[in-house]
Image (cartoon, rainbow, N blue to C red):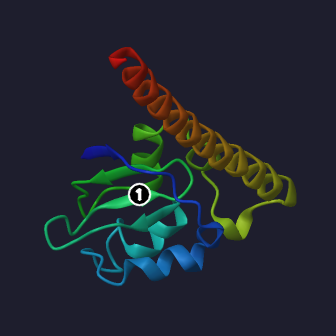
Amino acid sequence: MIVNSQPVHSNLNYFDQQQRRETFKKWVFKENQPCNADKMAEAGFIFTGSLRDPDSAACFFCNKHLDGWEAADDPWKEHLNHAKECDFAKMQVAQDNWTLAQWLDLHYKYQQIVIDKMYQEKRNAVTKMFNKLKRRADIY
């Protein structure tokens, strides 16, 4: 299984399991296999595959990208193994069984992730601009 890192998904629609499930139209495993599209969506994944990587998926919450899935893989187990810090994976609870407290806690933590990502992007942009201006000032 290969793990990649990409930008955070800031689409709140992916909090809904059915919205995640709809991204798996071209998933490589059948419904009667443990690593099926329903289980992938239940475990927080969205399909990110392509012709080159037909079994690539990412957690909408922690943004952990995984590929190299096998038909017998357990999506919840693999998610937690590769993303021990992911609050969604740590919960190990299907959306239909969430309590209100769990729903609120996940939304709060997700908003923190999105805000932290936005802050880092702005900070990096300002740092880049500062360094560019500094280089110009050093020329003169």
Label 1, on which residue?
58
Q: Eyeballing the image, is 52 above or below 75?
A: below
Residue 136 x %, y %: 38, 25
- Closer-to-camera residue (57/133): 133
Q: Residue furthest left?
A: 52
The quadrant holding residue 95 is bottom right
Using a 10 Å C-alpha cutoff, classify the residue at mark 1 as few (fewer than 14 neighbours), some (14 to 19) or many (20 or more): many
Residue 7 x %, y %: 45, 51
Q: Is residue 139 left or right of residue 118?
A: left
- Closer-to-camera residue (117/84): 117
Q: Amino acid at mark 1?
A: Ala
Is residue 11 at least partly visible in the picture?
yes
Residue at 38% in and 78% down:
24
Residue at 41% in and 57% down:
58
Residue at 39% in and 56% down:
74
Is residue 84 at least partly visible in the picture?
no
Q: Eyeballing the image, is 50 above or below 60?
A: below
Q: Eyeballing the image, is 107 above or below 26?
A: above
Q: Is residue 84 left or right of residue 14?
A: left
